[in-house]
Amino acid sequence: MSASNLPMVIPSKKAWNHGRIIGQKRPLLPKHVWAIRVRLELAGATRDLALFDLAVDSKLRGCDLVRLKVADVYAAGTVKERASILQSKTSTPVRFEITDGTCKSLADWISSPFMSCYEFLWPGRFHDRPHISTRQYELR
């Protein structure tokens, strides 16, 4: 039987990425970063603001960002000016500076009543998971 005699197969559903831009995305412009920060501040989203600020400052991968512990960025009652972490993918140490705005948002997040006894900086919602997953990080 030749290919021209076969019936045409029409998918019942569109592909999940039909019409979407796939692949590497363009980096955020500074005006976009500031717009996101202002909206998070106005919404009073302390956790989301601290997570966004630290992600921008550290430039870490999502898997390394969600595994950060409070002790990595907080010592002696204040947020550290510099932090160091070992990347999970390359096993190389990465040092990054924490800016003043990020220090303030991290201090607000760590001092919130929700963070009273957690070891991880971004605790998970379920007791069997110590920190949020990378999927939850991406959805934020």
Image: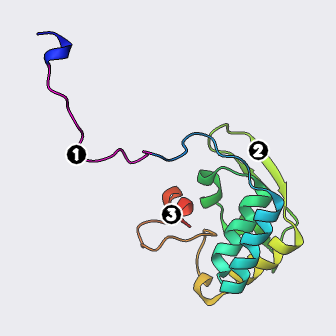
Q: Which residue is mark 1?
A: 12
* The quadrant where residue 29 appears: bottom right
> Which residue ends up furthest to the front in the rendered image?
4
Residue 37, position as x, y percentages in the image: 75, 73
Residue 13 horizontal side relative to residue 126, left or right: left
Magenta stretch: includes residue 92: no
Q: Which residue is mark 3?
A: 136
Nearer to us in this view, 21 or 96: 21
In the picture, the quarter occupied by the C terminus is bottom right
Residue 125, position as x, y percentages in the image: 46, 74
Callout 3 amino acid: Gln
* The quadrant where residue 87 appears: top right
Query: Rounded to the nearest whole Å, what is the CA distance between mark 3 and mark 2?
Result: 25 Å
Tell me, for residue 28, which label it has, or none.
none
Q: Nearer the viewer, mark 3 or mark 2?
A: 3
Q: Which residue is mark 2?
A: 93
Q: Which residues are magenta?
A: 6-18
Q: Nearer the viewer, mark 3 or mark 1?
A: 1
Nearer to us in this view, 101 or 4: 4
